[in-house]
Amino acid sequence: MADYVAAVDQGTTGTRCMIFDREGRVVASDYEEHRQIFPQAGWVEHDPLEIWAKTQKVVGAALEAGRLRPTDVSALGIANQRETTVVWDRQTGQPLYNAIVWQCTRTDGQCRRLIDAGLEPLIRERTGLLVATYFSATKLVWLLENVPGLRAAAERGDALFGTIDTWLIWNLTGGPRGGVHVTDVTNASRTMLMNLATLDWDPGLLAAMGIPRAMLPTIRPSSEAASYGDVAGIVVDGAALGWPVCGDLGDQQAALVGQACFAPGEAKNTYGTGSFMLMNTGDHPVSSTRGLLTTVGYDLGAGRCAYALEGSIAVTGAAVQWLRDNLGLIEHAAETEAIAATVPDTGGVYFVPAFSGLYAPHWDMYARGAIVGLTRFSNRAHLVRATLEAICYQAREVLDAMEADSGIGLRTLKVDGGAVANDLLMQMQADILGVPVVRPTVRETTALGAAYAAGLAAGVWATTDALRQHGGVERTFEPQWDDARRAVGYHGWARAVERSRGWIES
């Protein structure tokens, strides 16, 4: 058996390929950014063909960087931005519209129709999700209503729908020449169309939203020993790679697996464009009454399906990008640590980055960003520090809801994603949460989780227990604030959030 496992981590801002050895160590990596397309205020799109081209590029470049032969790799796993929605022509492989990104808010009208029709309780019961612009279903409804000829093509089975994992697997396995049209349970659970009890598309919800079943992919486990198909769409040295594609997880669930959160009560938070906290709740879904989502954590086959509570935060790292790209206050994200450290606190400034509404636990699509507490004393450093604190306070809101819904008090929080390199941010997170924050040695746990899923299917690793032996802790951040300071800061945050809510009149 080959010694290595490859993973493609297709994220909101770019695509990474990482290759791991049997000990879970990175042996090669490559990364490419892709364009962010903003046709109108609140609209966010990606070019699916660009994403596919970048995927091919990083896979080849990672092999070259590691000086590996294709035969050195035993399997490929996929992790992906989850709710982002693509439709394409089965015969030509051409997208019928740009991918509508999970952040996009154009479907507030479709959401309102579902709510006004009294469907939200049914959707909540069957899918574990709230009605929000975040999820795939209303994006697909919008496409069916606005792309000429799409509905007829969908009903004929000529137009296919998928989240980004489905788009990539279809192209990887041959595209118009026999590509496999599949997704896994974690990605399907984010569409607002999959029944959590049956782990299949819900006929009643499809009918209520007018979505043709023929355009939907088959739902499979996250780790598939039989594989979804072999890589035919990437050629190296004149031959298709031929790797079995046998792991597929939405990016946040992939990080849950990569952090080895295999026991109920174990939780992780991923810091990327947004932030996503997931807690393993075991083999039964836990309903939330506090604005969290109930979702599939992973399905590793052979009855190894676990559920999770999730708190999804729309804007965290994207707020830092806004400081850089829109305000010009920083040149690089890494600068935020040094700049924020020049002041002892925010000087009373709070920044609520509700650029696309508020996600968990508020779910207010009409909220918008707000900066409050400004005085003549306020300067660049205060605003930069407030941006970092906003990331941490949003995580605190989610954790409070998670502990209340699950009845489990979190003892430590495992963290991953690009922003965890910021020591000040991680210390702030520990201070604001009041629990230790644990940073792993391998920080790209999303790719690692996809590799684990593929490697388990391919027999590289026998059990999840074996995966717990990998990796390690790079640093633990212990809380330094006392309870009084923590309470005062959180009270100010709550007041700022209230001022951001309902800004757009419905």
Image (spheres, grey):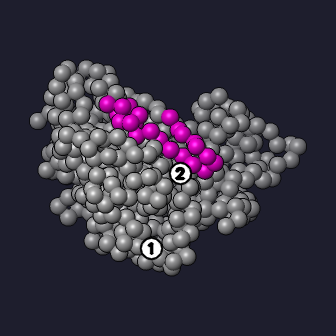
On residue 124, the disc is 1
Q: SS class of the residue under badge 2? A: loop
Location of residue 66 (image quadrant): top left
Q: Is residue 212 left or right of residue 225?
A: right
Instruction: List x then y, in percent, for residue 174.
Output: 21, 39
User: In percent of the image, x 55 and y 76: which residue is there?
Assistant: 116
- Asked which quadrant contains residue 440, the reply is top left
Q: Please report the bounds of the magenta region as a residue range.
A: 35-56
Q: Secondary structure at mark 1?
A: helix
Name the outermost residue toward the left: 1
Per the image, the residue denoted by label 2 is 103
- The 10 Å Cα crowd at callout 2, few under 14, some 14 to 19, many 20 or more, is many
Q: CA distance from mark 1 to mark 2?
A: 20 Å
The amino acid pointed to by label 2 is: Gln
Q: Which mark is residue 231?
A: none
Query: Between 282 and 411, which is closer to the camera in this rendering?
Result: 282
